[in-house]
C-alpha cells in the first residue's frame, strides 16, 4: 500500500519549452501533496504544498508562475515547469499524504530527472 | 532556528556489523520524527516514525530508531548490516502544530556497507 508514482521518470527538453510532471497516489487518496527539488548530493528542498481543490502554497523563493502546481483530484497533482532553462535541471520528487493531521506519513514518488538543454 | 542535524556525511560499516546513523534536532514543542531511505536515482522510502509512546521504534528492513528527548536525538540503528542497506538516509522532523505539516530535513547520511 501507499504507492506514489511519477511520470515521466526522466525528461530532456530544450530551453524555453514547458514540461509537465505528474504525481499520482495509486492506492490511497492524497489530501495533501508536496513537491520537492533535490540537487546532487543534497537534501530535499520543499517547493510547494498543495491540497486538493485549492491553490498551492509555495515556499519562499519559489516562483509560482514558473512552477505551476495543480492538484485537481485526490489522486493527481501536476507540476509544470514553464519556459524551462538549464538552471531548472534537477531531480523533482513529489510526496503524498492521506490525511490532514501531522502524524500522517508522506509517501514519495520515485522522482523525475529533468534535464534542460 | 529550528533544524535537523545529521552530523556524519558518510558512515562506513562492514557487513554483519551493527550500524548507527545519527540524527539530532532543535525544534520547539513535541516533534514527530521520521527516517527515510533513498536509493540511487530513486525517490524516498519511508522507514519508520516516532509519534508518541515507546521510545524504541521498529521499522522496515530490520531498522529501528531510538527517541531520546533529553538528548534531542533520533538515531537510526540496525543490529546487522547488509550490503543492500547501502543508500542515502534522511532524518526529518514534522513540527506540530503547523498549518501545512511541513517536514524539516537533515542533510542526509550516505551509508556504505562493505562486504
Image: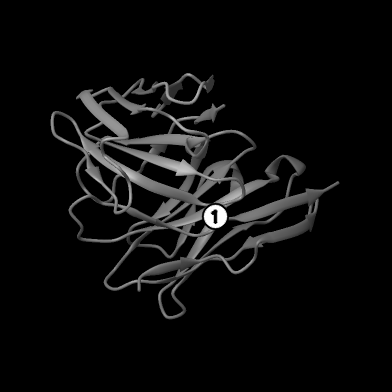
Q: Is residue B28 rendered to the left or right of residue A115?
A: left
The image shows residue B49, relative to residue A24, as above or below, that is: below
Image coordinates of residue B30 in percent, x first then y, are: 29, 68
**Where does the image place residue B19, in percent across and percent down from the top left?**
69, 59
Q: Say which residue appears at 27% left-offset and 31% top-offset.
A: A69
Q: Which residue is mark 1?
A: B64
Residue visible at 32% across and 35% down? Answer: A66
For mark 1, name the chain.
Answer: B
Q: Residue at x 70, y 45 (%)?
A: B86
Number of residues whose C-alpha sits closer than 10 Å to that of mark 1, classed few (under 14), some (14–19) or many (20 or more): many
| A40 or A88: nearer the viewer | A88
Quarter of the view holding residue A58 = top left
* Element marked by disc 1: strand
Q: Quadrant of residue A55?
A: top left
Q: In the image, B93: left or right of B58?
A: left
- Does residue B18 appear anywhere in the picture? no
Depth order, front residue of B58/B42 = B42
Q: Nearer the viewer, residue B57 or A114?
A: A114
Q: Is residue A113 visible?
A: yes
Quarter containing the C terminus of chain A: top right
Q: Outermost residue, right direction?
A: B115
Question: In the drawing, does residue A29 fall left or right of residue B15?
Answer: left
**Image quadrant in which you'd find residue A40:** top right
Residue under the point 53% across and 53% down: B90
Locate residue B44, reporting x and y percent: 51, 39
Amino acid at each position: 500500500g501507499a504507492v506514489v508514482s511519477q511520470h515521466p521518470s526522466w525528461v530532456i527538453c530544450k530551453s524555453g519549452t514547458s514540461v509537465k510532471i505528474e504525481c499520482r497516489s495509486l492506492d490511497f487518496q492524497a489530501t495533501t501533496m508536496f513537491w520537492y527539488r533535490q540537487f546532487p548530493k543534497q537534501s530535499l528542498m520543499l517547493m510547494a504544498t498543495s491540497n486538493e481543490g485549492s491553490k498551492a502554497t509555495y515556499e519562499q523563493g519559489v516562483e509560482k508562475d514558473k512552477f505551476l502546481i495543480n492538484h485537481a483530484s485526490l489522486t493527481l497533482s501536476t507540476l509544470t515547469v514553464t519556459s524551462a532553462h538549464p538552471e531548472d535541471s534537477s531531480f523533482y520528487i513529489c510526496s503524498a499524504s492521506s490525511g490532514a493531521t501531522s502524524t500522517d506519513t508522506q509517501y514519495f514518488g520515485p522522482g523525475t530527472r529533468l534535464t534542460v538543454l | 532556528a529550528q533544524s535537523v542535524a545529521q552530523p556524519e556525511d558518510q558512515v562506513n560499516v562492514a557487513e554483519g556489523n551493527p550500524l548507527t546513523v545519527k540524527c539530532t534536532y532543535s525544534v520547539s514543542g513535541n516533534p514527530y520524527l521520521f527516517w527515510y531511505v533513498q536509493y540511487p536515482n530513486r525517490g524516498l522510502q519511508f522507514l519508520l516514525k516516532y509519534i508518541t509512546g515507546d521510545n524504541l521504534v521498529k521499522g522496515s528492513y530490520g531498522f529501528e530508531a531510538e527517541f531520546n528527548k533529553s538528548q534531542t536525538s533520533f538515531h537510526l540503528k540496525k543490529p546487522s548490516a547488509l550490503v543492500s542497506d547501502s543508500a542515502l538516509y534522511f532524518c526529518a522532523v514534522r513540527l506540530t502544530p503547523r498549518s501545512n505539516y511541513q517536514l524539516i530535513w537533515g542533510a542526509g547520511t550516505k551509508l556504505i556497507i562493505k562486504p
